[in-house]
Image (cartoon, rainbow, N blue to C red):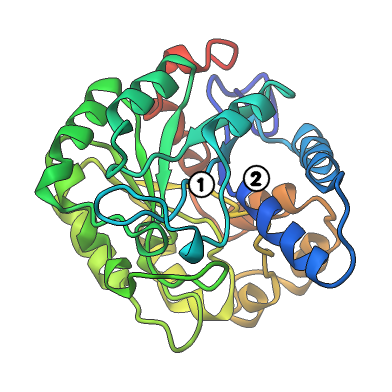
Amino acid sequence: MPPVLDPLQLDTGTLALFVGQAATALVQAQLAARGFGDLRFDELYLNKLLEWASESTLEAAVLLAEDWVRDDHGAVRKDLSDAFVSNNEVFAAVKRSPKLLAGVSIHPARRDALDELERCAAEGAVLLKLLPCVQNVDCNQKKYKSFWTKLAELGLPLLAHTGGEFFVRSCRNDLKSPLCLRLPLECGVTVIAAHCGTRALPWDGNHFEDFLKMRKEFQNFYGDLSALSHITHLRSLEQLREEPERLLHGTDYPVVTAVFPSWLKGWISKETMQRLRAIRNPLEKKIELTRALGFPERVFTDLWDLIPTAAVPTMT
């Protein structure tokens, strides 16, 4: 998102998709509200993240920006935004480690959307991240066609949140289905549906069947396994284990990886569960769970073929 375990055995390697900086802003606000504010929080958080990435078997991980919630004309709606992480902040952060790559966030309604997209691509961004239901991005609006066409020309994948969401507010619950990503796909964009349209909470709408439908229809459509480890994901995970086509590994850090549900289903032994629960590094824990569930090794490596090779000269 290079080797996974043995540097001598693989030419390409694991790229994890995970939220880092956006979570920083939200967690810091929550801590400050409880009297635990610390102006050094961003630095402490990033340092810990760098430590975990360095100690993990990941070759690289994508650090994600998060644009403001905006209206259909591109105006910022701070009243609806729970988190904001600028692209420049992400570019600065990834310079701290050769294992970090930049995932930028640009709302297509911005007046400078095309210019910002080209700037970010030139600076080495490897993908675009959007949360349509959170940021109010109706990807199928025809006025965004030029934006998606440019994204395809630049060779940047779109990583788009799909399915349930509870970490930040959703202002458009009608934009949680992968069906909302049809226009970018038709414009030639490689689209990665984060979470494969699964529910986050028991009462969420489940858009997993929409994901399966879109995956059959579009060869440039992928899903990621980020966050998929909880009770609410078991039915979808079962089918994904049987049909792992065009799936990518992801952690969705700092979302916690759950191990117990996989043991409950009989997918892993008690010994494996105990081994996984003992892993303190959350990035490594998700890698090991994904492998223990029997997903093919290509879920750890296929993203290298989807992102611009020029953006990762030290990784190839």
Residue at 41 percent of width and 51 percent of height: 76
Which x, y percent locates residue 313? 53, 10
Q: Can residue 20 be seen in this view?
A: no
Q: Are marks 2 and 1 in contact (CB under 8 Å)?
A: yes
**Which secondary structure, mark 2?**
helix
- Work out whether residue 198 or residue 149 is closer to the camera in this orientation and state it: 149
**Which secondary structure, mark 1?**
loop
Please identify the quarter of the rendering in which residue 197 is found.
bottom left
Q: How many marks?
A: 2
Q: Is residue 277 above or below residue 254?
A: below
Which x, y percent locates residue 35? 89, 69
Q: In this view, does 311 lie above or below 91?
A: above
Residue at 65 percent of width and 45 percent of height: 21
Q: What label does residue 256 carry, if any?
A: none
Residue at 32 percent of width and 23 percent of height: 115
Q: Is residue 30 visible?
A: yes
Q: Residues within 10 Å of mark 1 (few under 14, many from 20)?
A: many
- Work out whether residue 33 or residue 256 is closer to the camera in this orientation and state it: 33
Q: What label does residue 21 carry, if any?
A: 2
Q: Name the residue under label 1.
A: 66
Residue at 39 percent of width and 39 percent of height: 106
Please identify the quarter of the rendering in which residue 92 is found.
top right
Which amino acid is tagged 2? Gln
Q: In this view, does 295 lie to the left or right of 8?
A: left
Which amino acid is tagged 1? Glu
Q: Is residue 44 left or right of residue 72?
A: right
Q: In this view, does 120 lie above or below 170?
A: above
Which x, y percent locates residue 311? 48, 17
Which x, y percent locates residue 125? 47, 25
